[in-house]
Image: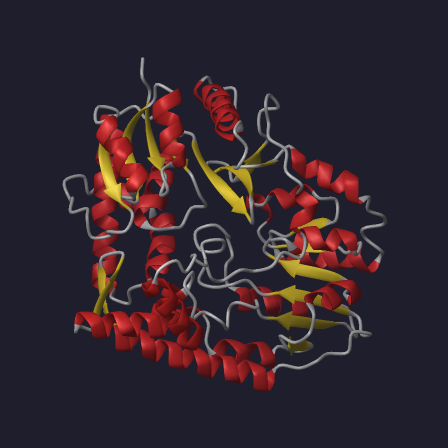
Amino acid sequence: MCKPIILLDRDGNLLEYILKHTSFNIVVLVCEFNTKTNTLLESHPHRITHTLNYLNLLEIQHCTHIDYNLIKQMKFIQIDIETMLHRVILNNPIAKDMYYQYLSFFAEIFETYQIAFVLNAEMILATPHHLIPFGLAKLRNIPSYTLEELYGRVALFYYNTRENLAFDTFNKPKYPIKEQCFYLYNTHATNPNTTLKDRVKALFYKIGGAMLVEFISCMKNLSFKRRFLNLEYNYFQKFYSLLKHKQMHRYYKRHSHTPDLNENFIYFNLHLEPEAAIIGRAPLEAQLTLIKMTANALPKGWKLYVKEHPHQLLMNDSLTDYFLHNITFFKNIEFYKHIALVPNTILVSLQVSSKDLIAHSKAIATFNGTVCLESIAFQKPIIMFDSDSSPYRFLSNTLHIFSYQDLQEAIEKIQKGFPYKLDENEEFAKLDLYISNITSPHFYDNLLATITKHSSSVSQGEI
């Protein structure tokens, strides 16, 4: 019997493997209509029932399965989705309606089909067509999985219980985890300038970034009305947001400092916002609150050094310019002003090396990320505020925070010399079970074997 699944796969690589090497029927596919995906849809019409365009949030108009009890049960999902929608739209009636339309659609899907599992080929983005099927699956105890990309590596996350799963050992691809420490954050996907048009576009990009390229496109089309995810916006609204963003950058440069690295301090590594790594994942995503908690728990004489993510203030690029739509909704000058008001807290200049901050700190405070790997080389403890969703939680130098009391106890341990000694090879070996190489020819074999075994155990009540 061909089991029905829900698949979210924007590039089509996982879709291709499932259609060619498994018997699963895809009840709902969320994708982008690129050349590969279109070819697969044409060649396997009977294997896919519903296809949703990831780039069209207004596609679903469905209200026949609205149910108040379900709405109450899914409130935890609704909050995250509406927060994520603020990245592109500040229209509350439209955002709420969009949520309810998708909720009704997926409610009917789950009532009609006995879904075997939900699988997402990337991190959950907290959009309606991503997060709602995961929330419904969790309510019905249907396994749901997402692939967590970790800068070239991949971890398998089981959404229902918020834990990372170990990959099946058979044919598991290897990955040199250690090489990802202190990675180069690339903000622009360069294309080979093979044509005159490509070279001209690259020149405009070099002069004025993604916003200048978009302005040229508007002039060419004689219209400043634009669409993103099929939501209409005006170019000048986005440009105004860019100006506010630059103002925020100037403020940060003026009010950040070069701290004394010889002091006793904890390094708070701010996360990029608005990004899916926080929204829809972290139970407590308010970084200002975490800063206040950490500063309040500091021993007498200690400081909290807070440094912004290097890309937070540089978003006029081809990969994250869509953040500019409503960027100041998520971070703004007031955010930095409030940090400055927190006792024993210093806003650190971007010119100060993160390596130096890690090396001289007593500990690093963060949600997750490669700073957890980088801390191993310096024998530094990590205070993790979102440890459940990260495979880095298996590292010996991590302290997992679920309450203010946990934070106090963690800092007490740090004062006593935690961690006492770390062996780099042993620590990286702990991650090997949970991290795989998506470029390996055996990756999808291993992935589906892992998921099939795990979902079977869930359905039989073994997990």
Q: Is residue 76 above or below residue 340?
A: above
- Point out the image quarter for the N terminus: top left
Q: How is the image coloured?
A: secondary structure
Residue 256 sits above or below residue 114 on the image: below
The image shows residue 51 at horizontal and vertical percentages of 24, 37
The residue under the point 25% across, 32% down is 41
Say if 427 sits above or below 232 in the image. above
Number of dots carrying numbers:
0
Residue 156, visible in the rendered structure: yes
| Residue 238 horizontal side relative to residue 417, left or right | left
Q: Residue at x 47, y 64 (%)?
A: 273
Answer with the quarter of the image where residue 375 lies.
bottom right
Q: Nearer the viewer, residue 5 or 209?
A: 209
In front of the other: 215 or 144: 215
Q: Position of residue 186 (x, y in %)?
A: 53, 60
Quarter where residue 62 is shown: top left
Q: Where does the image place residue 376, in percent across and percent down from the top left?
A: 75, 51
- Point 19% across, 46% down: residue: 60
Relative to 169, say whether 226 is above or below. Answer: below
Q: Is residue 140 visible?
A: no
Residue 365 percent location from the top left of the image: 66, 60
Residue at image point 47% right, 25% down: 448
